[in-house]
Image (spheres, rainbow, N blue to C red):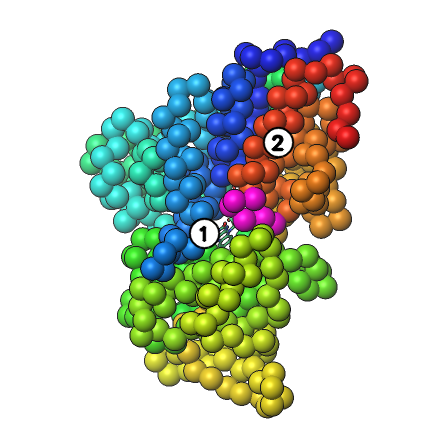
Amino acid sequence: MKPNTGKGAKVLIIGGGIAGLSAATALCDLGISPLVLEKSPFLGGHAIQFACKATDSCQNCFACSVEEQLRKVTENPQILGTLNSELKRLTKKDGRFMAVIERYPALIDPERCNNCGECFKVCPEADKAAIQEAYSVYNQSRYGINIDRCLYFAKDKSCNRCQEACPENAIALDQDAEKMEREFDAVIVASGFTPADPAEKDQFGYGTHKNVVSALELERILRSRGKAIRPSDEKEPKKIAFIQCVGSRERKRPFCSRACAYALRMAAAIRARQPDIETTTFYIDIQSFGKEFLKTYKALKADIRMVRMIPGDVYQVEGDRLCVSFMDHATHQALDEVFDMAVLSVGLMPGKDNKVLSELLRIDLDETGFFSPPDHTAGRETTQDGIFVAGTARGPMDIADTIADAGKAAWEAARYLITDTTSWRYP
Ligand SMILES: Cc1cc2nc3c(=O)[nH]c(=O)nc-3n(C[C@H](O)[C@H](O)[C@H](O)COP(=O)(O)OP(=O)(O)OC[C@H]3O[C@@H](n4cnc5c(N)ncnc54)[C@H](O)[C@@H]3O)c2cc1C
């Protein structure tokens, strides 16, 4: 039997990052009803945290397009979403998928919350993201509780400080997860990536040296403060070292995370806003993706010092400054240079849930742990009829490629729904 075909068909989208949001909009335009299932309290994924990297002109970092896509989704009543939710089981019967979804209710009532932030101030685990602040005005309420990190859920209801501090009585922690059963005609997996853990590279001192941050943390600083500041004293740094390829292009994970372009744009954006800051980018080599990249690279590198060498060590010295040891490529001399801040350009690793999802959905992972290689000539269908993969769940890609990839996954799902599945084959 065929699934429900054409208009009115229902598609489950796992993940509410830019891939999931783009797939939802594309499906909706085709008259197909999407349900976006997001594990965290907010939509937008990693990219909703990013700062605009414009200098005196737009650098095409695409951060603003994520905000715009989120606006479209939240304003479209045809797109349904469920936050704090996880897929627990998926079976297929008579061509349709039966999904069992576990959903935590909104622990912070968006109708009552006045965004005052008292909950955030009193949370003892706020620095570990037990309470998260949304990055976009389109995420309501502005604060969300992360069940995986909140002490109330982790330690036998041991902490309810946020609930007690809330002046509007908007927080109710004592709520149980509910199970929902829903039927779908197709599934799109858009569960994204996990940033490489910068602490794994202990020679760079992440977690011990105060002014070593990950590129994701710098994105958040730029977005919330509008400029680069040192975490230790909130002062403007004079010299910043960017260290590329942290977590990728190594024996264990030989693939490229395609992060050169946004790290260079980030350095250029800082120089444009804070011209007194000197930036140095330590790199293995520059990988070019997209037809515009070389033009952008030539324009940006004129303003950024580039050192083709990954440093051996980063030590903390007086004033919470950082001494970076590296070998000069030209002279082969060992050098020590002092910076005020170091930024680790973390790579894009397979999503934390990929293994669980691959078992639940009975679809294969490749040898790197992603769902399939990001080969733009290949289809987005999986080893299971009716299940498709979109965005960085397939492998590292930037926002523009993710949006395009999600659009293609939506088209392939639509094609599956309006074609006889037994005769359908991707060319
Ligand atoms: C430091 C850094 C800076 C970057 N800067 C740029 C830039 O300037 N420009 C650019 O083009 N690209 C940039 N990128 C790349 C960009 O982050 C990705 O292209 C983009 O986020 C991919 O979107 P996605 O939806 O595929 O994945 P994600 O952003 O990872 O979103 C996936 C979503 O799925 C949810 N999810 C995960 N598992 C489950 C599950 N089991 N059930 C339900 N939901 C689940 C997650 O909570 C998340 O909301 C950067 C990457 C990094 C690491």
Label 1, on which residue? Answer: 61
Give the SS element for disc 2: helix
How many residues crowd mark 1 within 10 Å: few (<14), some (14–19), many (20+)? some
Give the SS element for disc 1: loop
Count of marks overlaid on the render: 2
Q: Where is residue 21 drawn, in percent x and y?
A: 48, 33
Q: Is residue 400 magenta?
A: yes
Q: Which label number is shown at residue 143?
A: none
Label located before the other in sequence (1 or 2): 1
First to last magenta residue range: 396-401
Residue at the location (31% across, 68% down)?
274
**Direction right: furthest residue:** 423
Task: Please state, as top left, top right, bottom left or bottom right, where the C terminus lies in the image.
Answer: top right
Question: Residue 266's image quarter?
Answer: bottom left
Question: Residue 339's image quarter?
Answer: bottom left
Q: Is residue 18 left or right of residue 417?
A: left
Residue at the location (47% across, 42% down)?
45
Residue nearest the viewer, comparing 272 with 38: 272
**Direction left: furthest residue:** 167
Q: Is residue 125 above or below residue 296?
A: above
Q: Which amino acid type is shown beneath numbered disc 2?
A: Ala
Q: Where is residue 256 drawn, in percent x and y?
A: 64, 58
What is the C-alpha distance between the residues marked 1 and 2?
Answer: 22 Å
Q: Is mark 1 within 8 Å of ligand 1?
A: yes
Residue nearest the viewer, comparing 82 with 306: 306
Q: Which amino acid type is shown beneath numbered disc 1?
A: Cys
Residue at the location (52% across, 16% down)?
31
Q: Is residue 101 magenta?
A: no
Q: Is residue 158 above or below residue 415?
A: below
Task: Please state, as top left, top right, bottom left or bottom right, where the N terminus lies in the image.
Answer: top right
Label 2, on which residue? Answer: 409
